[in-house]
Amino acid sequence: MEYSILFGGKAGQGPNILSIILSKTLTQKGYFVFLSRDYQSLIRGGHNFNVLTFSDKPVYSNKSKIDLIVALDENTIEIHKKELNKDGIILFKKDVESMYFLGRLYKILGLDFLELENQLKEIEKNFEENVKDAKQGYDEEKRIVCKVKSEKNKLSFKNGNQGISEGAIKSGLDLYYAYPMTPATNVLTELAEKQIKNNHLVLELESEIAVINTGIGSAITGAKTMIGTSGGGFDLMTEALSLTGMARVPLVIYLASRPGPSTGVATYTSQGDLGLARYSGHGEFNKMILAPGNPKEAEELTNQAFYFSQKFKIPVIILSDKHLAESFFSYNENPKLIKSLKSTNLRRYNSYEMDKFGCATEDAKIIKKNVDERLKLQKEISEEAEKFKQFEVYGKKSKNIVVGWGSTKGAILDAIKDLSIEFLQFLYLEPFPIKTKKFLEGKNIILIENNSTAQLGKLIAEKTGIITHEKNKILKYDGRPFFSDELKLEIKKRMIK
Amino acid sequence: MKEKKENTNQEINTPIIPTWCPGCFNFQILAGIKSSLLKQFEQGKKKEDFAIVTGIGCHAKIFDYINLNGINTLHGRVLPTCLGIKIGNPNLNVLGFSGDGDAYAEGMEHLIYAARYNADFKYFVHNNQVFALTIAQPTPVTEKGYIDKTNPLGVKFNPINPIKIMLSAGAGFVARIFAEKSQIEWIFEEAMKHKGFAFIEILQPCIIFHNDQGYKNRTYNLQENNHDKTNLKQAFEKAEEFDYNIINEKTKIPIGIFYQEEKPTIEEQYPQLKKLKEDKKSWKDIQR
């Protein structure tokens, strides 16, 4: 079984919190949940909604159709009724509190009221009022549409940003610096909340330029240091990013994308910054780009980012986007983590090419030697990276292969469930895993990206010489993630026999 | 070529021969900082207890002539780098050096915030009122009317007054001196005694592009003239006396400590950093 619920309303009415409460109960019952969030750049009013898809089998994305709409305002019905399945349900009532709807919903899903009461207890705030409102809804509702039982799965429930934060903490994070910018901000709040318990420090500084330069100062003292931002903030950091490449500074950089150019669409999603990450910083220097596709991979790749940054004293970029950062997943695999040592001591560092005394130099021989060392390092990084899972291949062996990276993973996996097709997911984008070439050669490549210029396609072409046919590029660039059912149709259209 | 001397443990000289112009006032600053450091070593501090951060410009060459750990960082980013080092290891004595372009043009946002954060490090601004290393362009503290190749019509704007900016931003130690070894030694010691961010502007006339050596004869010492450095209003009045425009026979340039007040430092206010300081540890020593 699979069931989709849309929670819609004005910002401040709480569609987000309602959907998270139900998701937690469902996850505890052993159901797989995927919960996405669509919100506008405003604080009160407007129209926000969350879409919760749950199933007794793994589910990683939403479909375009909805089984039930929780309408916290009339506007929600207007906007979303066309997405409702036949026999779908709309829950709406004027002049009731939000928790009333959650009561009705728990009844409809055949959940015990006690399950809801337990969740409300955890929130603490307004407990008695919340229980009263929810009970009213629970008692008024008479339908039971979908009986949720207990499944045996033991599941984690996290969003991408929580995966990043967990990965950082478990890798021995000492310092995190940031300037608020959606969709990276809740790594800042998540890590800030845990700083005393975990004995790390989180500081919000005056600008992204200050963030990376303070990060560099701390990293050269030996502290495990991470910074986080989105595209515009990352732009500001790039001069200093180049310094980390020159001075060999171990720094982990979280880049959570949203649609650009410029301020773009602040609270929506895009994979438009792969090119930015690849070409960021002037001059030629070493960096890595890792791209998780779900919260578990976010935790693992953040862990590997610390490992590589410390081992080779380089900047490592974790590239995510709003759809991964702020969507919740439930999953049953445990992340595999490795230990990284603190490699760096305070010595003499320089933004100039430097000699053995740490002093600036213009000596041709030394310049060439330094550049050669950086080139040698590039090889060493690539060799070490080969010891890690740089890409994943899913699905059934076929002439057809879907290729993607990052947050599209969920929709792709759900879309290809019943198709005879392979799926190649890139986890490492820099260094490029050249072994992927043999999976691509001679295949009908179907490229799926949440951007308008097929940036992964360009990277693959540059590194392997393999070009994806224009008609085989499935690109979405309206700020919204892919729906698995629509994606399935698009993939099928392009498959060959 | 003679074999260069390897750096021994407490050796603060590097084998690099300075490339400042002959007679540059930066030599005075270098001599003053070196003798101040040696005095600190005599009093028990070690070379490893210090870190040096410099920006980009003539001032930054000082990094190559003093053998301390640290970083010759990007133009304008000395202050966030100092902050990062201080947070990374709160037990270090961090010394930042900037030029006036570095501090007042590209790095201005950080200057305001350094005063606000009040991390315990010392910041020396070599103010020669000109971008010297890029050949004579005006900085935010160059006088109105200054003419160079980039401004053939003359600079149309009044210079900013960094002393007033620092007083307004809430800096706990605001000083100006002239680039003379003995003055450097005096202010270094005063700044080291102060707990918190110390802003020290050093008037360092550029003998090639902004030769205002007359400055020195126009200076008078605040501390020898009954200035109350705990009085913010008086500090502002003294800061008003010199507006960085071209000088004449009436100009008086106050030097010394304009204002001093100890305020809580960033290291004292975060329990994580306070603990590191108490335990004499850095984050590097924390094993997880």
Image: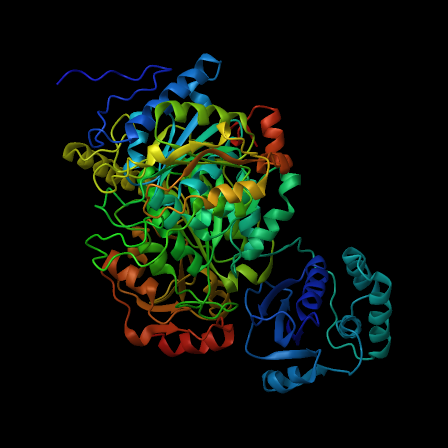
Work out whether residue B135 or residue A308 is closer to the camera in this orientation and state it. B135
Work out whether residue B246 or residue B76 is closer to the camera in this orientation and state it. B246
Q: Is residue A302 visible?
A: no
Left/right placement of residue B17 relative to residue B232 reads left
Left/right placement of residue A27 relative to residue B41 reads right
Percent position of residue B209, x then y = 22, 42
Q: How is the image coloured?
A: rainbow
Percent position of residue B125, x then y = 39, 38
Q: Quadrant of the C terminus of chain B?
A: top right
Placement of B22 over or under A210, stated as above or below = above
Residue at 65 percent across and 48 percent down: it is A193
Residue at 71 percent across and 68 percent down: it is A18
Q: How many marks?
A: 0
Percent position of residue A337, x then y = 52, 41
Q: Furthest residue to the front?
A: B250
**In which quadrant of the rendered view does residue B259 lie?**
top right
Percent position of residue A373, x then y = 24, 35
Placement of A409 over or under B107, stated as above or below = below
